[in-house]
Amino acid sequence: MNKSASAHWQGSLKEGKGTISTESGALKANPYGFNTRFEDEPGTNPEELIGAAHAGCFSMAFSMLLGEAGYTPDSIDTKAVVTLTKQDDGFAVTAVALTMSAAIPGIAQKEFDEIAGKAKSGCPISKLLKADISLEATLG
């Protein structure tokens, strides 16, 4: 399975503007830029999108693992806070803090904690944050 998203950018870093779109159409030419990333202007940014992807992925992985253990959650609510830190060689995502609350009938705290830990390390987006990255770049 392959899913795709694209970005279009025009101009310099601070004055430039871009749009982000997804293959599914969930995002279609959504604006992003320096001001939406560092100055809290309306629009999205890469870190926010990573946070949304991580929160969604974790919730689905947790639900799957709960099902394998015989539980059906009434609800799972997850928030991901992505930390972007300035370093000597530029910026880096240095942390993602997941906060989750769930209503799961019949589960004990110890089993809840164990399954949540497995979901944190096993969801594909958690694994992505440790992945090798390749690039095919074309100047056109």
Image (tube, rainbow, N blue to C red):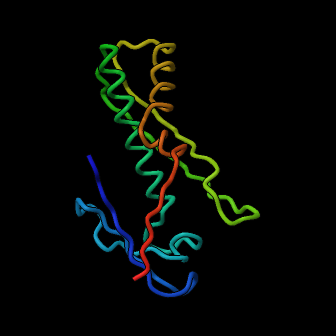
Please name the residue shown 29% across and 54% down the image: 3
Please name the residue shown 52% across and 46% down the image: 129
Does residue 2 appear to the left or right of 98 in the view shown? Answer: left
Q: Position of residue 13 (x, y in %)?
A: 57, 81
User: Looking at the image, how many numbered discs can be counted on the residues?
Assistant: 0
The quarter holding residue 76 reads: top left
- Say if 39 sits above or below 61 in the image: below
Q: Position of residue 64 (x, y in %)?
A: 32, 27
Q: What is the quadrant of the C terminus in the image?
A: bottom left
Please name the residue shown 64% across and 50% down the image: 94
Please name the residue shown 26% across and 61% down the image: 26
Q: Position of residue 29 (x, y in %)?
A: 31, 74
Query: Can you name the residue that lies furthest to the left here?
Result: 24
Q: Position of residue 55 (x, y in %)?
A: 43, 44
Task: Report the front residue among 74 and 85.
Answer: 85
Does residue 92 appear to the left or right of 44 in the view shown? Answer: right
Query: Can you name the residue that lies furthest to the right here?
Result: 88
Does residue 28 appear to the left or right of 84 in the view shown? Answer: left
- Say if 20 sits above or below 92 in the image: below
Task: Report the front residue among 140 and 99.
Answer: 140
